[in-house]
Image: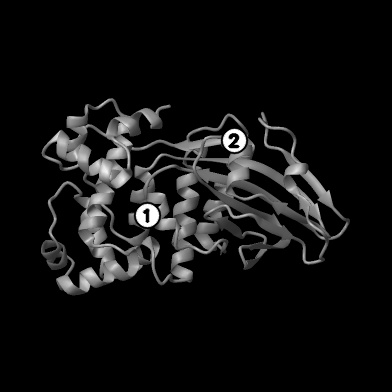
């Protein structure tokens, strides 16, 4: 199984950066989280065929024991198929990518209908030294799939994934299609060893896939909708560029060229919280990374994310996360 991981990018200096677009904001979020991924299956399926794929808990037990959540994806290399999850259905063809943000139990198959088979019954016992290869179905049209998942227990994942449908279809074209093809082909060629290219697979695919989806199917609410909103995105950029600053709503609204009332209203509509609450949560995300990815003392972590004292930081962290910084550090490294 090809394991691929993007470690948190942290330095010994306070967090400052540049996030200039919706794609840049998304890249910034994913750069701050510990995101891992794996290709877990490739196969060729002749029509008629259909699979019943398990949901999040069963997939975690099978693929990533100990993880809190998975994001499953299916890349169509040849042919066509349909996928249904929680009442949502998408039609896919060669070049498409399907993402299941919450890893719902889902059905998928050829357009020639047949009773679904539990895919877990066809897989060899884990762990796998190589990516399993399946051949299944009839003697009709062949569909080739590469299946994988992303995994992260980071705080912000709930925020920007929870507004997405149970299954979404990404149809890349041009440079995006080339990126998808090159990265997936390289991952398949490298196998379990991987290298610097496959290490960026989760970030490369998620950033581009979610960017494409949000631009083609604008969302009514949620983090991706906020990142594409002309008002809220300006405020988000300011927060991400300088999270240690003691921003007030008045300062944010002036810098974002809008009024306090409009900014507050747009944040509540899209994110269900105030700008200052978002700032606090983003600081906690940065702190959570530092606690796990570095050996910094709590006082140094507090200083890097803009808190004047270790005690104030510890209280805020426990209030937002439900665990003390020490407990989070111990769990994250456990």
Residue 94 vs residue 161, the one in the foreground: 161
Q: Is residue 333 left or right of residue 110?
A: left
Please give the name of the residue rendered at 48% of the width and 70% of the height, measured from the top-left corner: 216
Q: Is residue 20 above or below residue 203?
A: below
Q: Is residue 241 above or below residue 170?
A: above
Is disc 1 surrounded by few (<14), some (14 to 19) or many (20+) residues within 10 Å?
many
Percent across and percent down for residue 286 are 28, 42
Tell me the quarter of the picture where residue 234 sits. Answer: bottom left
Q: How many dots with numbers?
A: 2
Q: Is residue 88 left or right of residue 7?
A: right
Q: Would residue 266 be seen by someone viewing this image from the given angle?
A: yes
Please give the name of the residue rendered at 63% of the width and 53% of the height, measured from the top-left corner: 75
Identify the secondary structure beneath mark 2: strand
In the picture of the structure, the residue carrying the numbered disc 2 is: 2
Percent across and percent down for residue 16 are 21, 45
- Number of the label disc, if any, that sits on residue 231: none
- CA–CA distance between discs 2 and 1? 25 Å
Mark found first going from the N terminus, 2 or 1: 2
Please give the name of the residue rendered at 29% of the width and 30% of the height, measured from the top-left corner: 326
Residue 147 vs residue 195, the one in the foreground: 147
Tell me the quarter of the picture where residue 128 sits. Answer: top right
Q: Is residue 139 left or right of residue 210?
A: right
Percent across and percent down for residue 262 are 21, 74
Please give the name of the residue rendered at 21% of the width and 30% of the height, measured from the top-left corner: 298
Is disc 2 surrounded by few (<14), some (14 to 19) or many (20+) residues within 10 Å?
many
Tell me the quarter of the picture where residue 7 sits. Answer: top left
Q: Is residue 327 above or below residue 145?
A: above
In the picture of the structure, the residue carrying the numbered disc 1 is: 26
Percent across and percent down for residue 4 are 52, 37
Work out which quarter of the rendered image holds the C terminus and state it.
top left
Work out which quarter of the rendered image holds the N terminus and state it.
top right
């Amino acid at each position: 199984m090809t394991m691929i991981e993007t470690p948190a990018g942290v330095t010994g200096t306070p967090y400052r950066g540049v996030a200039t677009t919706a794609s840049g904001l998304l890249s910034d979020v994913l750069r701050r989280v510990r995101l891992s991924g794996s290709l877990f299956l490739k196969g060729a399926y002749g029509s008629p065929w259909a699979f019943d794929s398990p949901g999040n808990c069963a997939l975690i037990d099978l693929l990533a024991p100990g993880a809190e959540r998975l994001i499953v994806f299916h890349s169509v290399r040849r042919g066509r198929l349909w996928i249904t999850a929680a009442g949502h259905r998408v039609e896919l063809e060669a070049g498409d990518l399907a993402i299941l943000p919450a890893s719902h139990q889902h059905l998928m198959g050829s357009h020639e209908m047949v009773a679904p088979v539990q895919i877990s019954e066809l897989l060899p016992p884990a762990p796998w030294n190589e990516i399993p290869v399946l051949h299944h179905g009839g003697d009709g049209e062949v569909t080739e799939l590469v299946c994988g998942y992303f995994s992260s227990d980071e705080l912000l994942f709930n925020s920007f994934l929870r507004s997405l449908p149970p299954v979404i279809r990404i149809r890349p074209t041009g440079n995006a299609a080339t990126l998808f093809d090159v990265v997936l082909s390289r991952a398949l060629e490298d196998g379990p060893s991987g290298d610097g290219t496959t290490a960026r697979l989760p970030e490369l695919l998620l950033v581009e896939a979610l960017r494409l989806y949000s631009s083609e199917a604008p969302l009514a609410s949620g983090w991706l909708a906020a990142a594409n909103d002309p008002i809220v995105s300006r405020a988000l950029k300011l927060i991400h560029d300088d999270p240690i600053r003691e921003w007030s709503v008045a300062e944010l609204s002036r810098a974002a060229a809008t009024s306090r009332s409009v900014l507050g209203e747009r944040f509540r509509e899209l994110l269900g919280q105030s700008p200052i609450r978002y700032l606090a949560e983003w600081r906690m995300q940065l702190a959570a990374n530092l606690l796990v990815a570095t050996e910094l003392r709590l006082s140094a972590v507090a200083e890097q994310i803009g808190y004047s004292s270790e005690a104030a930081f510890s209280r805020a962290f426990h209030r937002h996360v439900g665990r003390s910084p020490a407990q989070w550090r111990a769990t994250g490294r456990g």
